[in-house]
Image (cartoon, rainbow, N blue to C red):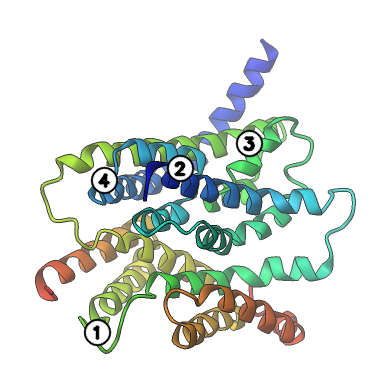
Amino acid sequence: MEKNRVVMKALKTAFPYTIPIFAGFWFLGITYGIYMNVSGFSFWYPMIMGLIIFAGSLEFVAVSFLLSPFHPLQVLIMTLMIQARHLFYGISMLDKYKNVGWKKWYLMFGMCDESFSINYSAHIPEAVDKGWFMFWVTFLNHMYWVSGATLGGLVGSLMTFDTNGLDFAMTAMFVVIFLEQFLKEKKHWTAWIGFLSAVTCRLLFGAENFMVPTMIGILLFLTLFRKPIEKEGGFL
Amino acid sequence: MTMVQQFITIGICVVGTVLTRCLPFFIFSSKKPTPVYIQYLGKALPSAIFAMLVVYCLKNVSIFSGSHGIPEAVSIIVVVLVHIWKRQMLFSIGAGTVCYMLLVQFVFTA
């Protein structure tokens, strides 16, 4: 009984933090489900992909993987490129995800941008179990995403209006995430390094092959300019 | 693509994602401090990566043909302005997407 009380208390504390994510994930999840639907996939696809991949940006890109010729190596490289940022979330969460028992496995699996952001920044009251709090944040976000994607996949077939251009939601999402990051910074060295590396490599290597050189370029320039960037605070 | 190839493709997405989310926990034991260089990258990378992802979304836009990237440019400006105005992620994404859909469906019809 005592355990139930601890678990429920953590849920009550966690839920309000996830309300904005609910709105965002339903909008993007439904959009993603519709996008899958109009691309010719049954609702099972967005539902199961939402459940087992649980990564918004990659799932949008995965639609184009599924519509292209089979190319597993390219899919793996693209996946690792798009998801590489999680490596750094993990580094930030090494301490916070300690001592939470079996829940650590699920927390690692479900560490999307939003779950990471909340679990990293939330001030969890002393009386609330941290492990269960982070579990509920991750779990609620996961369920919002899966239900939105499923719903989009189901109602997509009932859509009578022209959905051409709907996939721009993904671009808009990245623009907003980038802008949020940009507005927080004092200097923008790292943003410029990322932008110029990507544009230059896109022009040099073409639309299909520029991501790997871009990542290498970013690592190279971040390493070369480490001293001035750290001195000037070229990031938050 | 056959159904088996689809399942393999989705499976690779799962494995790749889980790998990037779990690897630091396996490499850096919580008993030892994280190397300073890795800590630096953790702070410096996010902006660079988000900038790269915006470019990635626009990789197929051509300035010299089709609609010359005008719908994309206009819609991104809308997203940025609305976001600076309201600071509501959902609202900014919605406004930009509606703007883009209207432009490609009614103005820049191919």
Q: What residue is pinned by disc 4?
A: A37
Q: Nearer the viewer, mark 4 or mark 3?
A: 4
Answer yes or no: do the residues labelled 1 and 3 have beta carbons within 8 Å?
no
User: Which element is circle 4 on?
Assistant: helix
Chain letter of the residue beneath label 3 in the structure image: A
Is A65 on the left or on the right of B103, as rendered? right
Q: Nearer the viewer, mark 1 or mark 2?
A: 2
Identity of the residue drawn at 21% across and 67% down: B99
Amino acid type assigned to the residue bearing label 1 in the image: His
Q: Nearer the viewer, mark 4 or mark 2?
A: 2
Question: Could you give the CA–CA distance between mark 1 and mark 2, rounded to whole angstroms?
Answer: 37 Å
Chain letter of the residue beneath label 2 in the structure image: B
Q: What residue is pinned by disc 1?
A: B68
x and y percent of residue B94 in the render? 28, 58
Frontmost residue, B27 versus A178: B27
x and y percent of residue B62 in the render? 30, 83
User: Which element is circle 1 on?
Assistant: loop
x and y percent of residue B97 in the render? 27, 62
Is B91 on the left or on the right of A189, as rendered? left
Q: In which quadrant of the rendered image does the N terminus of chain A lie?
A: top right
Answer yes or no: do the residues labelled 2 and 3 have beta carbons within 8 Å?
no
Q: What residue is pinned by disc 2?
A: B7
- Against B86, residue A161 (above or below) is above
Amino acid type assigned to the residue bearing label 4 in the image: Asn
Whether residue B103 is visible to the viewer of this picture, yes or no, is: yes
Find residue A106 and name its label: 3
Q: In the figure, residue A103 lies in which quadrant?
A: top right
Find residue A144 and name its label: none
Answer yes or no: do the residues labelled 1 and 4 have beta carbons within 8 Å?
no
Amino acid type assigned to the residue bearing label 3 in the image: Tyr
